[in-house]
Image (cartoon, rainbow, N blue to C red):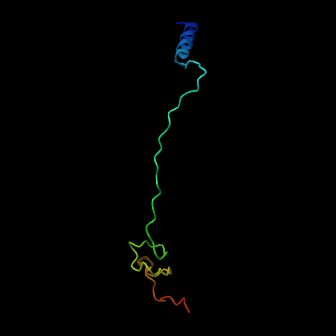
Amino acid sequence: MTARTYSALLLAALTACAPASSSREPTTTPIKTARVEAPREPPDEDGDGIDDARDRCCCSPEDLDGFEDEDGCPDRDNDGDVR
């Protein structure tokens, strides 16, 4: 096969695969989208950052002072920072 024959065959194959030109607009298929909701934050009634499911004192905010902060209950002034 000569280079000229190969080029002619390639051109014929590419032309056959090309869409026919027309004056109509191309048709599109609408894409269905899924509605995704962001995960909801767990309730935290007292606003101390500890969700109510883990908060032993869900109506009294934890005093975040580094002492037993994970229980969700305010602590007595164990570090002497309140006067």
Depth order, front residue of 20/70: 20
Name which quarter of the figure residue 69 lies in.
bottom left
For the point 46% across and 89% down, the residue is 76
Number of dots carrying numbers: 0
Name which quarter of the figure residue 39 lies in.
bottom left
- Above or below, comparing residue 4 to residue 78 in the picture: above
Q: Residue furthest front?
A: 24
Q: Residue furthest right?
A: 23
- Above or below, comparing residue 24 to residue 65 in the picture: above
For the point 54% across and 13% down, the residue is 10
Depth order, front residue of 79/53: 53
The C terminus - image quarter:
bottom right
- Above or below, comparing residue 74 to residue 14 in the picture: below
Task: Give percent across and percent down for residue 45.
Answer: 46, 74
Depth order, front residue of 71/42: 42
For the point 47% across and 89% down, the residue is 78
Task: Give percent across and percent down for residue 33.
Answer: 48, 44
For the point 56% across and 15% down, the residue is 15
Task: Give percent across and percent down for residue 57.
Answer: 41, 80
Task: Give percent across and percent down for residue 43.
Answer: 44, 69
